[in-house]
């Protein structure tokens, strides 16, 4: 699994430019499902056919990134964020653009780091002046951060664990899945980071009976962390709420029941802010039952997102068991 | 049952956003008295359906049943319980409140506060942020850990008070009072003829982003929507033209969120029957179920009435019972005539 | 082409009260389309069918509402309190002329004369709550003879032409309404677009993309093109910083790669770029990701490929905006060519 994770976290795919990562994931998934298709938003839909209730598993494959807005006289790029990028967290990070050009993020002098905003930042692509820069890149080009995968004791660190780890979980679950009556849509969604857009579209078109989002969540186990119940190594987090969804009690209780029955380590997640694809699925048309399995993660939306391998494994197992369950009573 | 008693029993029932089962069942009971059918959908919206004579159209009422509350976020090593807000809270209101935690069993607690004697002088002008507030159940840590878990819901635990001149104070008036308007309108409708089918909907998850109403509207696909919610009642210090007096009738709202012609008809009915009402104005859609309802699916023309309410989102929300009855009367007449004037609405 | 824009710009149509501009547009287009209708919110739909059987449906949209004010109270002395409709900088409001309601009652936004202010007050913007509209009424009763609570008001700004520019109010988005009108008129006799055009002039964009929210379920288009008047930022900057101007006047129509609500569909972006190159129409990108448009609420309903083409306007959401005549004409040209050559996308 580590090789799988390493490969997909390091693949390019900011919101709206998910082609590379989609191709990579499709490569893995084709062995495990009956049909693979792509919709107009670029969502990758992998179908395991069945006669029973329809379950949609959503993991978003887009990552946060940057978009160029202006080329300065001296040949530096001004840019905006794609998704929730913090100016402080992206300082001096490296980026790569959709056309392969590389750059590093610098800043004008600021007296206080807290005053840092995107107006002050720029990307240095090594161009001598505007003319040269214009030959290398256009305004409106998407870029993503780069950073290599690494291991810290039993923890894993990489960029874009949010939400490539969810993609890895879905791939692994598809691989392990035994025969079931449920019809399962593994949907690798696009544009989550800019407003849960891909999931909204796929739920609208697929109209599943149950939606399950797999995503990262915060953790309250670092020094002076905000009060949050989730901790690394405590197992898969079953979501109760975030700002996009109040998970129906029935769904949450069902997930807990499956976890307990199969002796899977789990914890409960209450997140005051932040949203997931489940929020979009839940409110689609006349409403769709939706829940979330989360992987507690430190330093989300930085280039060094840290999580525990054991939590990932627990998530894979729980997802697999849920997908194999009879969910007729739930819907 | 008298209006006051219905209101009392509804405000004493619990149902924070996302966990509306208890209050939803009670609302279903009240709806079923005068509706042909009353049921819950998967979003915990409660629907009371009353068939019309010709059933040539559908009118849907929405009044949210959820209330603001809290959710357990963390139990510390001494058994004190930290929480996150569900819906909009003023942290200054929370201190010293009695609460009820829905754990394995219902557990009582208070939100802790530092006695003045122990406060530092410089802290006396500061407001404690919600994340630093905690609930003290007084119980042993082991008991708390066994019976309370992360994700359990919490409500205020206070009874209402009957004040002078038909005024009443309670928690969760926002928007159980609106539900009472629906119950009373159904009651009025038993004395009238109406051609259209009526759907009285107690909606869920309004306080966390007008969610329940959007899915329910998509399902019912009404021709006309009516939203009932509370609105700001006059209290000392408030800017007079943004708030409404108690006991002067409910408000009828104007603005881009509301259908101008249907709103005009509503006002005409009130004038014709000499039932008092007040006019309110909102240049920007938002804040109530009308926000979602107007643009759900192919969209719905919406009108809205509000119950003037003092001290919104506290445990002593205060209103006048007479306003509720007046609104029900106007709305019932509106329902009974809607098929007639709907002919003039483009759709 | 410019006199049409003049009429559209001068027409009244604050969000939630778009009757005048809707009637005007309807009169302009009715002879050029196959069917016309409105819905309960006031969106105006015009259908122009292709001669091709089973042609794809392209929704072209522009919003006809404009920012303005809503009168929410008339006080005892006959002054009017108001709420802003849409995003308006309160600092712009002092000492402006407005017109109120269907009868266009003139009024001014007053302020305490500088002589009566404390020196410390000069340095601070006048808060919105201290602003009011004066129509010269002697009392509440007098005011209520001509104005009612709930009436809408807009800036009293007349359209003007000067050299190679035009100026006026509400170019956001009457420019877009103008472009779509020209699309509908832009065919020779016996000519037809290779796609069915559904033109929708939406309401209530400025108060949260409200009118457009009901469209996707009603028209189920295959593609969406939105036309906007967007921010041109090529104006003096006190700090003289080398930043993105968003768009620039006289540099041609702007294609939006990404804004707050939508990432432009890439195939459409490429098609528009190619079309512009083929017909030698200058174009630029919108180089900020702020702001949203109606397609934000349309494209996610089922996933409908969408993109925005904008005409740069300096000072949108202000009493008077300025636009280069050539940019407007080029937007019209690019729009028509894009649709005529649309088969290349299909």
Image (spheres, helix red, strand yellow):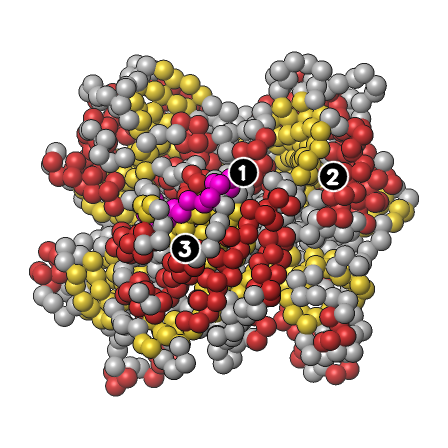
Q: Which of C284 and A45 is in front in this view?
A: A45
**How far across and down, in percent of the image, does residue C336 sit?**
75, 26
Q: Mark 2 belongs to which subunit?
A: C
Are labels 3 and 2 on one chain? no
Let me know if residue B55 is in the magenta part. yes
Tell me the distance, in whole angstroms, between the alpha carbons under discs 3 and 2.
Answer: 49 Å
**How far across and down, in percent of the image, does residue A307 sit?**
27, 40
Which quadrant of the figure contains the C terminus of chain B?
A: top right
**What residue is shown at x 55% (from left), y 70% (from top)?**
B276
Tell me the distance, in whole angstroms, between the alpha carbons under discs 2 and 1.
Answer: 23 Å
Are labels 3 and 1 on one chain? yes
In this figure, which residue is indicated by the disc labeled 1? Answer: B298
**What residue is shown at x 33% (from left), y 43% (from top)?**
B41
Mark 1 residue crowding within 10 angstroms, few (<14) / some (14–19) / many (20+): some
In terms of secondary structure, where does tag 1 sit? Answer: loop
Please name which of the two marks, 2 or 1, marks the residue nearer to the observer: 1
Q: Which of C322 and B218 is in front in this view?
A: B218
In this figure, which residue is indicated by the disc labeled 3? Answer: B190
In this figure, which residue is indicated by the disc labeled 2? Answer: C177
Q: Residue C182's quadrant in the figure?
A: top right
Q: Residue C120's quadrant in the figure?
A: bottom right
In this picture, which residue range is highlighted in magenta?
A: B43-58
In terms of secondary structure, where does tag 2 sit? Answer: helix
Q: Residue B11's quadrant in the figure?
A: bottom left
Which quadrant of the figure contains the N terminus of chain B?
A: bottom left
Q: Mark 3 belongs to which subunit?
A: B
Pointer 3 or 1: first along the chain: 3
């Amino acid at each position: 699994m580590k090789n799988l994770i390493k490969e997909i976290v390091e693949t390019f795919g900011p919101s709206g430019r998910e082609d590379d990562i989609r191709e990579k994931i499709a490569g893995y998934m084709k062995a495990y499902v009956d049909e693979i298709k792509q919709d107009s938003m670029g969502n990758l839909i992998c179908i395991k056919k069945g006669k029973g209730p329809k379950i949609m598993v959503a993991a978003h494959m887009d990552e946060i990134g940057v978009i160029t807005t202006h080329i300065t006289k001296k040949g530096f790029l001004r840019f905006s964020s794609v998704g929730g990028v913090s100016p402080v967290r992206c300082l001096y990070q490296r980026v790569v653009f959709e056309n392969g050009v590389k750059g590093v993020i610098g800043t004008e002098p600021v007296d206080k780091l807290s005053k840092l905003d995107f107006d002050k930042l720029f990307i240095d692509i090594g161009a001598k002046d505007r003319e040269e820069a214009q030959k290398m890149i256009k305004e409106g080009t998407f870029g993503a951060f780069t950073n290599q995968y690494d291991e810290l004791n039993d923890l894993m660190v990489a960029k874009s664990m949010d939400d490539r780890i969810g993609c890895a979980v879905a791939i692994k679950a598809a691989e392990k899945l035994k025969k079931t009556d449920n019809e399962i849509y593994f949907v690798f969604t696009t544009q989550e980071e800019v407003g849960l857009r891909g999931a909204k579209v796929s739920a609208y078109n697929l109209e599943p009976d149950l939606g399950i989002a797999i995503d990262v969540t915060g953790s309250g186990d670092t020094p002076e962390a905000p009060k949050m119940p989730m901790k690394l190594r405590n197992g898969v987090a079953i979501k109760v709420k975030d700002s996009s969804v109040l998970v129906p009690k029935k769904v949450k209780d069902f997930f807990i029941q499956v976890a307990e029955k199969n002796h899977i380590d789990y914890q409960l997640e209450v997140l005051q802010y932040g949203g997931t694809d489940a929020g979009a699925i839940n409110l689609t048309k006349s409403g769709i039952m939706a829940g979330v399995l989360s992987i507690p993660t430190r330093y989300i939306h930085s280039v060094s997102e840290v999580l525990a391998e054991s939590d990932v494994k627990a998530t894979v197992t729980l997802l697999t068991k849920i997908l194999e369950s009879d969910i007729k009573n739930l819907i | 049952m008298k209006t006051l008693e219905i209101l009392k029993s509804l405000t004493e029932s619990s149902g924070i956003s996302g966990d509306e089962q208890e209050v939803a069942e009670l609302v279903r009971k009240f709806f079923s008295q005068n509706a042909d059918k009353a049921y819950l959908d998967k979003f915990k919206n409660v629907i009371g359906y009353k068939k019309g004579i010709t059933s040539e159209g559908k009118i849907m009422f929405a009044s949210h049943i959820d209330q603001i509350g809290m959710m357990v976020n963390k139990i510390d090593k001494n058994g004190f319980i930290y929480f996150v807000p569900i819906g909009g809270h003023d942290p200054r209101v929370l201190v010293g409140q009695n609460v009820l935690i829905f754990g394995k069993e219902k557990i009582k607690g208070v939100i802790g506060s530092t006695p003045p004697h122990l406060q530092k002088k410089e802290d006396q002008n500061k407001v404690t942020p919600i994340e630093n507030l905690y609930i003290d159940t007084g119980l042993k840590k082991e008991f708390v850990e066994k019976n309370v878990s992360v994700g359990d819901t919490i409500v205020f635990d206070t009874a209402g008070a009957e004040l002078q001149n038909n005024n009443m104070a309670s928690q969760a008036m926002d928007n159980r009072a609106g539900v009472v308007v629906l119950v009373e309108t159904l009651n009025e409708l038993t004395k009238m003829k109406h051609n259209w089918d009526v759907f009285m909907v107690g909606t869920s998850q309004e306080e966390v982003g007008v969610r329940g109403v959007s899915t329910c509207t998509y399902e019912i696909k009404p021709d006309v929507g009516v939203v009932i919610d509370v609105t700001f009642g006059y209290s000392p210090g408030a800017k007079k033209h943004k708030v409404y007096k108690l006991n002067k009738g409910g408000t009828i709202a104007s603005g881009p969120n509301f259908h101008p012609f249907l709103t005009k008809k509503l006002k005409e009915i009130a004038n014709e029957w000499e039932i008092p009402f007040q006019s309110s104005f909102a240049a920007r859609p938002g804040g109530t179920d009308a926000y979602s309802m107007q643009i759900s699916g192919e969209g719905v023309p919406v009108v809205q009435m509000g119950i003037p309410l003092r001290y919104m989102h506290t445990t002593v929300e205060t209103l006048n019972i007479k306003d509720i009855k007046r609104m029900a009367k106007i709305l019932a007449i509106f329902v009974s005539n809607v098929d007639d004037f709907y002919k003039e609405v483009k759709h | 082409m410019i006199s049409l824009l003049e009429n559209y710009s001068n027409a009244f149509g604050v969000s939630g009260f778009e009757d005048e501009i809707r009637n005007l547009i309807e009169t302009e287009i009715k002879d050029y389309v196959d069917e016309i209708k409105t819905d309960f919110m006031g969106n105006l739909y015009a259908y122009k069918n292709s001669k091709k059987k089973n042609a794809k449906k392209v929704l072209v949209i522009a919003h006809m509402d404009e920012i303005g004010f809503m009168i929410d109270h008339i006080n005892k002395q006959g002054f009017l309190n108001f709420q802003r409709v849409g995003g308006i900088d309160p600092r712009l409001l002092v000492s402006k002329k407005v017109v109120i309601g269907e009868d266009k009652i003139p009024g001014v936004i007053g302020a305490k004369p500088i002589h009566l202010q404390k020196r410390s007050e000069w340095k601070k913007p006048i808060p919105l709550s201290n602003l009011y509209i004066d129509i010269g009424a002697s009392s509440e009763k007098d005011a209520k003879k001509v104005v009612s609570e709930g009436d809408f008001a807009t800036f009293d700004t007349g359209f003007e032409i000067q050299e190679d520019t035009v100026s006026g109010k509400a170019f956001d988005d009457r420019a877009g309404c103008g472009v779509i009108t020209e699309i509908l008129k832009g065919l020779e006799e016996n000519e037809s677009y290779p796609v069915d055009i559904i033109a929708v002039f939406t309401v209530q964009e400025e108060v949260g993309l409200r009118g457009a929210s009901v469209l996707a379920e009603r028209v189920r288009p295959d593609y969406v093109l939105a036309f906007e008047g967007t921010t041109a930022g090529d104006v003096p900057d006190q700090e003289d910083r080398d930043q993105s101007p968003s768009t620039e006047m006289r540099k041609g129509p702007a294609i939006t790669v990404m804004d707050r609500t939508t990432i432009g569909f890439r195939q459409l972006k490429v098609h528009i770029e190619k079309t512009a190159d083929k017909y030698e129409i200058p174009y630029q990108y919108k180089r900020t990701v702020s702001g949203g448009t109606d397609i934000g609420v349309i494209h996610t309903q089922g996933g409908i490929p969408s993109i925005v083409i904008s005409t740069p306007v300096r000072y949108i959401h202000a009493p008077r905006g300025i636009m280069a005549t050539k940019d407007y004409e080029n937007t019209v040209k690019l729009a028509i060519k894009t649709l005529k050559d649309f088969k290349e996308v299909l």
